[in-house]
Image: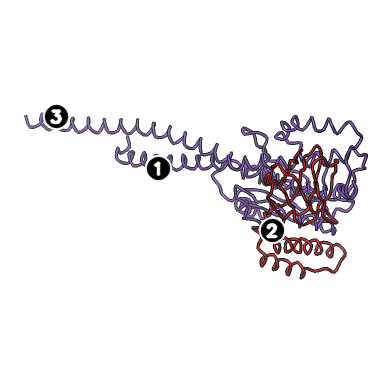
Amino acid sequence: MANARALDKRRKSVRNIRKITRTMELIATARFKKAMDRATAATAYTSRITEVVSDLARSGLQVSHPLLEARESKEKALLLVLTANRGLCGGYNGSVVRMAIPHIAKMRSEYGQVNLEVSGKRGINALGFRGLVPDESFLQFEDQPKFADVEVIANRYLDDFATGKLDRLDVVYTRFVSISRQIATVETLLPIGSLDGAADDAETKPTDGADAPGAGAADEGDSMYEFLPSAESILEEVVPASFRVKLFKCFLDAAVSEQIARMVAMKSATENAGDMIKQLSMTYNRARQSQITGEIMEIIGGVEALG
Amino acid sequence: MAQLNCIVVTPEKTAVDEQADFVALPLYDGELGIAPQHSPLIGRLGYGELRIRAGGTVQRYYIDGGFVQVSDNVVSVLTNRAVLASTLDASAVAEQLETANKQPSNSPELLEIRDRAVQQARAQLLVAKRN
C-alpha cells in the first residue's frame, strides 16, 4: 500500500485543482450569460431585417442581387474557421477542426485556390499541426465579439466578392441550437442562399409571434409602404446588411457555444476531482490505519521479545 | 397628440427605444423629417445625423447607413452603428477621412469602395463639428 504521506499530498493537489476548475466554471457561467444576452440582443436586428425583406417581397419585387446568385467560375474560395483562443473547453475546438479538415480538402478539389482564415489560437495551432497554415488569422475575438470588428472582415469579403476575387465563402463554426445542444457546422455565406436564412434561427421564432399583428396589418394593402428611393435600391442595401449580420451571428454563436462548452467541461472536471478526493481519502485512511497497526505490532513484538 | 416610438437597432443591441415628438433621419439623398401620423414608408438611409426630439430636448446620433421603416407611429431604424454625437471625436474622424482619401481607386469597384469610406468619414465629421 502506498505511503500515507504521499497520498495526502496527492489529495491536497487534487483539492487545489478542484478549486481552480470550480472557479473556471463560475467564470464561464458568467461569461456565457453575457454572451447569451448579446446574442439575443442581436436577434432584434435580424428579425427586423426579415420584416423589411418580407415587406419588399410583398410589394411584388423580384428578389435578385449579385450576392444571391451562384457564380459560374470556380476559382477562388475562402474558408473561415471559428475556434476559441483558449482551451479547456472539452471537445469544442476539436469538433470544429475535425469538421474543417475534410471540408478544406473538398473545397480544394472543387476550386482553383482556397484561402484559409482562422480565428482563435487553438484552431491556428491545431490546423498548423496538420500542415494547414492560415492565410489570415484573427486573435481579437473573445467572448464578446464586436460588430465593428466583424464588419471589417465582412466588408472585405463583400468587396472581394464584388470585384471577383472571391467566388465562395464558407464558415465552419459551432452553431448554437439550445443551451444543451451546439453543433459544429459548415455554412456557405457567399453567395447567400436565401434572405430568410438570416432569421430562421430557433431564437427568433418566439418574437415572430409578437410581430404577427404588424404583419397582419400589412397584409391588408398589397404594399402599404412607400419606398424611398425604390424597392430595388433598398434590396441592394438589404442583401449586404443581411450578410454582415449573418457573419456576426456566426461569431456570436461561436462565442456562446465556447462558454457553454467550457462550463460543461469544467463542471465535469470539478465533479471528477470530487470523486477522486473521496477515493484518495479512503485509500489514505486505510494506509494510515495499517501503518498504525504495523507500528503497534512492532511494539508488541518488541515487548514480547524482551519478556 | 400622438407620439412616435423611435427604435434604433444595431446588430449588437437596441440603441434607442423611446417616445419622440419628431424624428429627423439622414436618408440617402437628404434629410427626412418624420412627425406623428406619417404614412408608412421604408427608406434607405445614408450616413449622417439622426435627431430625436422629445419634449424640449434633442438627442443627436451619428447613423451609419441602413434602413428606416415607418408604420403605425413606430420609426424603426436599422443601422450598423449608432453613436451619440457627443462621443464622436473630430480629430480622429479627420484622420479617418485622410486615410479614406488615400485608398486606391484604379477600378470602378475600388472607386466605389473608396467613395463609401470617404462619405462615411465626411458625414461623421459634419456631425462631430456640430457638437
Q: Position of residue A29 (x, y in %)?
A: 54, 39
Q: Secondary structure at mark 1?
A: helix
- Residue A47: image quadrant is top right
The residue marked by circle 3 belongs to what chain? A
Residue at horizontal 71 percent and vertical 31 percent from the top: A206
The residue marked by circle 1 belongs to what chain? A
Amino acid at dot 1:
Asn
Name the residue tied to disc 1.
Answer: A16
Amino acid at dot 3:
Ile
**Considering depth in this image, is A298 or A62 the residue closer to the camera?**
A62
Callout in the foreground (2, 3): 2
Name the residue tied to disc 2.
Answer: A136
The N terminus of chain A lies in quadrant: top left
**Chain letter, purple in picture:** A
Q: Are marks 1 and 3 on the same chain?
A: yes
Give me the disc on residue A300. 3
